[in-house]
Image: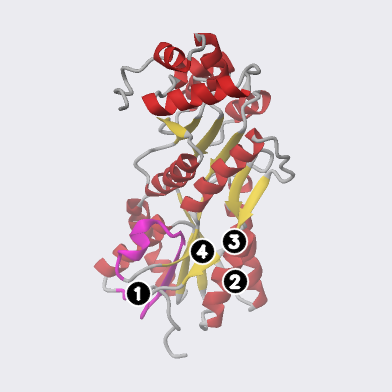
Amino acid sequence: MRRDRMSTTIKDVAKMAGVSISTVSRVINDSKPVSPEARRRVLKSIEELGYKPNEVARSLVTKKSNLIGIIVDDIGSSYVAQIIRGVEEVGRMYNYDILLCSSYGDKEAEMRFVQLLMQKQVAGIIMVSEILNSEVLTYLDMSKVPFIYLNKYYNVLESPTVAINNREASDKVMKHLIDEGHKRISYVTQEKDVELTIEKQKLESYREWISSINESGIVFEVDGHNISDGYDLGERIIDTLLEKKITAVYCCEDEIALGLINYFYDHNIRVPEDISVVGYGDISLASYYRPKLTTIKEPYYDIGAVSIRRILKVLQGEKIEEQTLVLPVQLIERDSTSKPKNI
């Protein structure tokens, strides 16, 4: 009969196996050679007693741990939760646990958490950030701990990351709208650091498609990432949309698109009958709002899962050639787009 796991010690395992404590330690940590017979007896005793090694103490000896550190911008964000779920579920398959820290966009907090995780001797670090923190990136690059840097807004091409092809994604949106018959299409972009962010690729695609149908596009800028920011944007741009007879608005984020749809609803502008709206991201709310939002799917769960698999491959000694792992792009067609009127 097994003893309580919490009360079983390495001394109990050594006594049952008829070996020294140091021999048990060597088997557990795989640190020095042990005879096959002694190893068999130790492993059998561990199983029968239900002994679980203290992972913290073990990491101090082996300089390794079965811990993956995750630093996120905000644990309350829906896309962050999906990334964490992907990391956690794959990690569990390989007997890795996670240590989770939330920086709330504070550069000093990001650095402090990176250093803390290093002290905990984590096997790898996954950072999910919405700011550009070059100091942290330099620190991670100089460390010997494998890491993945995920950023929803900024291009991080010089660091290991997992992402989608934003140019291809934007091409899919524009082709979809133009195929439906839209010509007067507006794009809503984030105004901050455009040259450094994924917005650069999306804007280039938008402008090239607009040029291809001999139209002049209208780009609106928004400073914020929330549904309320999208609603406020509607109040600023409504007169221009009506004057220019815009039939479709392509938004850089789902939250902005949902806020804009709310504004239209409050002002008796029907989506998609009067104007089509497309988002970007496929957050959970995109399929719950009415009309359901047509959008680009950013596969956040898969991004988390692929991130930890990449770290585990590095830990196993596999050589990774590409810094950026690119996942497939998918346009989710729902109810917020249709053919424009009179077509």
- Residue under label 4: 187
- Residue under label 1: 271
User: Marks 1 and 2, Cα distance to the nearest angstrom?
Assistant: 23 Å
- Which callout, 3 or 4, points at the residue further toward the start of the chain? 4
Q: Name the residue nearer the viewer: 98 or 219.
A: 98
- Which callout, 4 or 2, points at the residue further toward the start of the chain? 4
Element at label 3: loop
> Is there CB contact under 8 Å for labels 3 and 4?
no
From the image, state whether disc 1 or disc 2 is nearer to you: 1
User: Marks 3 and 4, Cα distance to the nearest angstrom?
Assistant: 23 Å
Residue shown at the point (70%, 35%) measured from the top left: 317
- Which callout, 2 or 3, points at the residue further toward the start of the chain? 2
Q: Position of residue 177 (x, y in %)?
A: 52, 76
Q: Position of residue 139 (x, y in %)?
A: 62, 24
User: Marks 1 and 4, Cα distance to the nearest angstrom?
Assistant: 16 Å
* Residue 11 to residue 320: above or below: above
Q: Amino acid at mark 1?
A: Val
- Which callout, 1 or 4, points at the residue further toward the start of the chain? 4
Element at label 4: strand
User: Marks 2 and 3, Cα distance to the nearest angstrom?
Assistant: 30 Å
User: Marks 4 and 2, Cα distance to the nearest angstrom?
Assistant: 11 Å
- Residue under label 2: 216
Quadrant holding the N terminus: top left
Apparent side of residue 336 relative to residue 71 in the rendered image (left or right):
left
* Residue 140 to residue 206: above or below: above
Q: Amino acid at mark 3?
A: Pro
* Segment colored magenta: 269-290
Element at label 1: loop
- Residue under label 3: 328
> Is there CB contact under 8 Å for labels 1 and 2?
no
Count of labels shown?
A: 4
